[in-house]
Image (cartoon, rainbow, N blue to C red):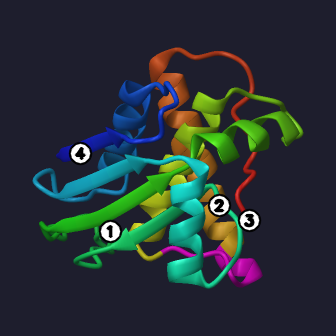
Amino acid sequence: MSIDVNNESGTEVDEQSILDIARYALARMRIHPLSELSVIVVDAEAMEQLHIQWMDLPGPTDVMSFPMDELRPPSKDDEEPPQGLLGDIVLCPEVATQQGKDAPTQHSMDEELQLLTVHGVLHLLGYDHEEPDEKAEMFGLQAAIVDGWRAEKGLTGPSPAPTVS
């Protein structure tokens, strides 16, 4: 799996954990091991510009996903996953910091960025949360991936509650 993490935010973030959880999520979703993903960490101003440009919404947001080849997880266990470019995930540590503080189970900016990375991966794979049933599926899968990764890493304590909307 080729995953690039590029921090352009000016904020120190745990790039290795972003890389690790992205790799874990893609493996768990059975995405071809030669597929490519880019994760970009930007400041609030850059995120706000993207949010306005692509969503026509004001203010910075936490995560945005820009799919390329519209890869999807294989639907059957014996199905060979396609190889390709997943796309870009853009994260904003300033928004992540505030969301971590405001969450029911307060957590760090890095824990929020890990959650947002998984959220972004799922969006790249076609998952959405517009409808209640879609939201239940996506957020359930997101929690399972974050919990599985945390357990594999031996991290203790509650996993971050979903704060993305």
| Mark 3 element type | loop
| Mark 1 element type | loop
Q: Residue at x 58, y 72 (%)?
A: 51
| Mark 2 element type | loop
The residues tagged by marks 1 and 2 sit, at their Cα atoms, a distance apart of 26 Å
The residues tagged by marks 1 and 4 sit, at their Cα atoms, a distance apart of 17 Å
> Mark 1 highlights which residue?
73
x%, y% of residue 155? Answer: 58, 17
Q: Tell me the kind of residue under disc 1.
A: Pro
> Mark 2 highlights which residue?
61
Q: Tell me the kind of residue under disc 4.
A: Ile
Question: Magenta stretch?
Answer: 127-134
Instruction: Give the vertical position of 98 relative to 87 (above or below).
Output: above
The residues tagged by marks 3 and 4 sit, at their Cα atoms, a distance apart of 25 Å
> Mark 3 highlights which residue?
165
Residue 31, by quadrant, is: bottom left
Q: Tell me the kind of residue under disc 3.
A: Ser
Q: Residue at x 48, y 69 (%)?
A: 123
> Mark 4 highlights which residue?
3
Dot 1 or dot 2, earlier in sequence: 2
Which of discs 3 and 1 lies nearer the camera? The answer is 3
Q: Of residues 158 and 107, which is closer to you in this image?
A: 107
Other-residue count near label 3 (Cα within 10 Å), few / some / many at <14 / 14–19 / ≥20: few
Which of discs 1 and 2 lies nearer the camera? The answer is 2
x%, y% of residue 70? Answer: 29, 79
Dot 3 or dot 4, earlier in sequence: 4
x%, y% of residue 80? Answer: 14, 68
Q: Residue at x 87, y 41 (%)?
A: 102
